[in-house]
Image (cartoon, rainbow, N blue to C red):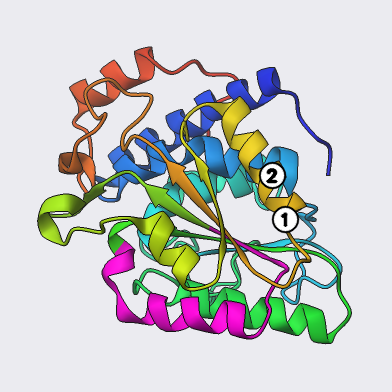
């Protein structure tokens, strides 16, 4: 994998955000808010940090692999997979359409390159990532497993069962990230089910915890991922608390749960696209 510069990553982020709003608008369905908020994370991961191969191997032997637990933010993942060579960007025009491989929540039955599990039933991704990380250790494979989950997802009990399992089994080749945007489908997480001190909770469960305070700043995101990787191999899994703004990059979508799962109108799309430079060519 070629490591891209911060300037190159910025250009890719702008295009990925265009892809997100255009995909969701095109079918009037999907989840733009957290997709926009996690753009820097996905772009940094695939274009700067992970050792991965777009000639997709389901087993992921000898390469870093990624699992998305909060599968509803599929638009950002599809865009990054396409832009990093897993499939033709033109296929993004089929997002959520009948017989498309780009389903609303990632799925495996259509064999879309880059997707290793069906996800979107919240709470399951960390369990899968721990299993994959254990398999790599058994196979003497020194590559890294990455995964992402939402902060609202921390209200799922299975997350905490997995949180116990990781340190118990010394899964020290895993970097889990929580998108801390403080929003979920029905409102702010503090009002729906207060998460309180996530750092203290995960540390109490035995994880090495870092915080990326500016999750929409590429330099901080890259630095956070590099710090997380430096902590691997010490007998404990690593958790990255990534603080983002839902809807980041489009001024009328920023910081509100209202754009969790609705699509922009024609006029709103046009406004959004004026704020996002086309850098790699639209699909």
Specify whether 83 is left or right of 277: right
**Helix or strand or loop: what does disc 1 sit on?**
loop
Residue at 76% of width from left, 66% of height from top?
234
Residue 272 figure quarter: top left
Residue 64 visible? The answer is: yes
Decide which of 108, 248 is in the foreground and name it. 248
| Residue at (73, 38) in percent of width and height | 48
Image mark for residue 227: 2
Q: What element carries label 2?
A: helix
Residue 69 visible in rendering? no
Q: Give the labeled residue for mark 1.
A: 231
Query: What label sits on residue 282 in the rendered view?
Result: none
| Residue 254 placement (x, y as % from top left) | 26, 29
Task: Tell me which residue sits at (38%, 24%) in the image.
Answer: 249
Disc 1 to disc 2, C-alpha distance: 7 Å
Label 1 crowd bin: few (<14), some (14–19), many (20+), radius 10 Å: some
> How far across and down, in percent of the image, does residue 138 sit?
81, 87
Q: Residue 24, located in which quarter of the rendered image?
A: top left
Task: Tell me residue 61's x, y (percent).
Answer: 83, 73
Front-lying residue, 93 or 60: 60
| Predominant SS along the magenta part | helix
Chain part drawn in magenta: 153-176
Instruction: Judge from the rendering whether residue 171 lies leftward or rightward of residue 139; answer left or right.
Output: left
Left or right: 203, with 272 as reference point: right
Choose top left, top right, bottom left or bottom right for residue 198: bottom left
- Is the Cβ of the residue at disc 1 closer than 8 Å to that at disc 2? yes
How many neighbours does mark 2 have within 10 angstroms: few (below 14), some (14-19), or many (20 or more)?
Answer: some
Q: Is residue 69 shown in magenta?
A: no
């Amino acid at each position: 994998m070629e490591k891209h510069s911060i300037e190159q990553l910025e250009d890719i982020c702008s295009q990925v955000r265009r892809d997100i709003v255009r995909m969701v608008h095109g079918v009037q369905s999907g989840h733009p808010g957290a997709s926009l908020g996690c753009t820097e994370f996905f772009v940094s991961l695939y274009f700067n940090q992970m050792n991965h191969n777009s000639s997709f191997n389901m087993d992921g032997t000898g390469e870093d692999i990624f699992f998305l637990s909060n599968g509803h933010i599929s638009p950002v993942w599809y865009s990054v997979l396409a832009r990093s060579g897993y499939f033709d960007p033109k296929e993004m025009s089929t997002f959520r359409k009948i017989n498309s491989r780009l389903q609303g929540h990632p799925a495996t039955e259509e064999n879309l390159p880059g997707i290793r599990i069906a996800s979107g039933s919240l709470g399951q991704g960390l369990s899968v990532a721990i299993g994959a990380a254990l398999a790599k250790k058994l196979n003497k494979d020194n590559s890294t497993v990455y995964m992402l989950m939402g902060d609202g997802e921390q209200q799922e009990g299975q997350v905490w069962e997995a949180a116990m399992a990781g340190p118990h089994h010394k899964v020290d080749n895993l970097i889990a990230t929580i998108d801390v945007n403080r929003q979920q489908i029905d409102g702010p997480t503090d009002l729906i089910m207060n998460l309180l001190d996530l750092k203290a909770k995960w540390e109490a469960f035995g994880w090495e915890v870092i915080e990326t305070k500016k999750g929409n700043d590429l330099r901080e995101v890259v630095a956070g991922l590099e710090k997380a990787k430096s902590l691997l191999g010490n007998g404990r899994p690593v958790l990255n608390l990534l603080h983002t703004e839902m809807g980041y990059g489009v001024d009328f979508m920023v910081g509100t749960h209202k754009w969790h799962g609705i699509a922009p109108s024609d006029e709103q799309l046009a406004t959004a696209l004026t704020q996002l430079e086309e850098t790699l060519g639209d699909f």
